[in-house]
Amino acid sequence: MTVYCEPDPARTYPGSDPVRVTATLLALYDDLAANPGTSLVVLGAGVDQADALGFAAEQRVQRPFLGVVLLRDTFEVDLLAAAIRAGVREVVATADTRGGDAACERARELSARLGVAAPPVPAVSAEARVVTVFAGKGGVGKSTVATNLAATLADGGRRRVLLIDLDLHFGDIGILLPKVRIRDNMRLDAQQYRIKIADMPVAQGEVEPTRMLAIDSGVTTGRVDGVPTKDPAFGTDAIWIDPAAATQAEMYGYTVVEAGAVLATHLTEVCRRHADEILTRDATKHLVDELKKTSRYTVSVIAIQSSNSVLRLVRFLRLRR
């Protein structure tokens, strides 16, 4: 079955085969969700060009069997190149009815060869499993193991799997952080630091610049010499050790990090916990602009729900923290 998307009601479907008609891309997404066996989408000339290409690029990954034919009143070579990159099957002039029919027929034939029947959509369950792949040392294959495990658990699309890659030292906060200003404070000891947000202290800690921090993983098998302390970011038991003892500490199961990484991790965790205070209008606008580059549909939904107001979106995100 074919779906024809055209915002302008005066532009009727130029082909002769039966179609379902939607007036917006939002309605088109809903139609595809309700009819997973759809083999062809025809985007009318009234659909914004960037939105049409963005839709095609998304469907090329999500529904590779789905054919997308683009109708344009006029088009240049640049559009043809962009359409090919986005995964559009064919671009046809609106007035070329016969050519449009032929293009749709070729697209449907290709969809049939690719296997038009969509894989069954997994039912959404209220329960889920969380699998953590963790190691304090870098370069040991965590990402490779996690990716292969996620692919295996997905079982060819029969299960929904969300893969999240988090950096141990720098984290993935998801917001644009403001500039960090560093100031001397004679009231603090030489090894102490204090973190402030809007000039209000929110955290503090100590670092030993000439030592490394061996963090107890909970499964350590030995003890290393050093100065007992607490990891300032998470409050776990740790020891400031001499760099020469780092290899031995890792053999015992400790997570060993440099002093600079300790401070950076603490700063990241503070930002994560106080993200609602750090999130500003400019940062939110930057997030929306970046998201628009890869998912124009999602941004259009955000714009609808926030009444095109970035300020209202900021307030919404703060409440949802």
Image (tube, rainbow, N blue to C red):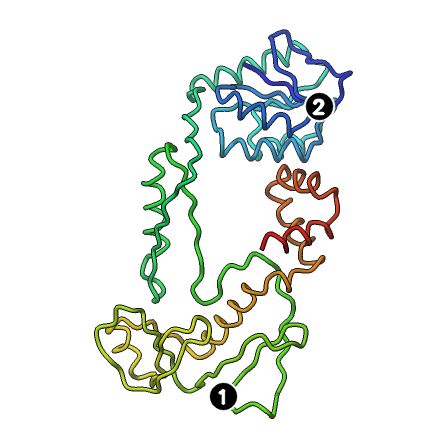
Q: What residue sits 71% from the left and 57% below the top?
A: 281
Residue 216, x across and y down, in percent: 32, 73
Residue 175: x and y in percent read 60, 58
**Do the numbered discs 1 and 2 sit on residues whose CB atoms are within 8 Å?**
no
* Residue 191 numbered tag: 1
Q: What residue is rendered at 67% in x and 54% in y? A: 284
Residue depicted at 43% across the width and 70% down the height: 234
Taking 139 as reference, is 220 above or below it?
A: below
Q: Which image quadrant is residue 159 in?
A: top left
Q: Which residue is labeled 2 in the image?
A: 72
Q: Viewer-proximal residue, 135 or 51?
A: 135
Q: Position of residue 141 (x, y in %)?
A: 32, 57
Few, some or many residues within 10 Å of mark 1 (<14, 14–19, 20+): few
**Amino acid type at mark 2:** Arg
Disc on the earlier residue, 1 or 2 = 2
Q: Is residue 109 above or below residue 187?
A: above
Does 186 sit left or right of 260 as displayed? Answer: right
Q: Label 1 vs label 2: CA separation?
A: 66 Å
SS class, disc 1: loop
Q: Quadrant of residue 229?
A: bottom left
Which percent across, then down, holds residue 152?
A: 32, 40
Which of labels 1 and 2 is toward the front?
A: 1
Q: Residue furthest left?
A: 221
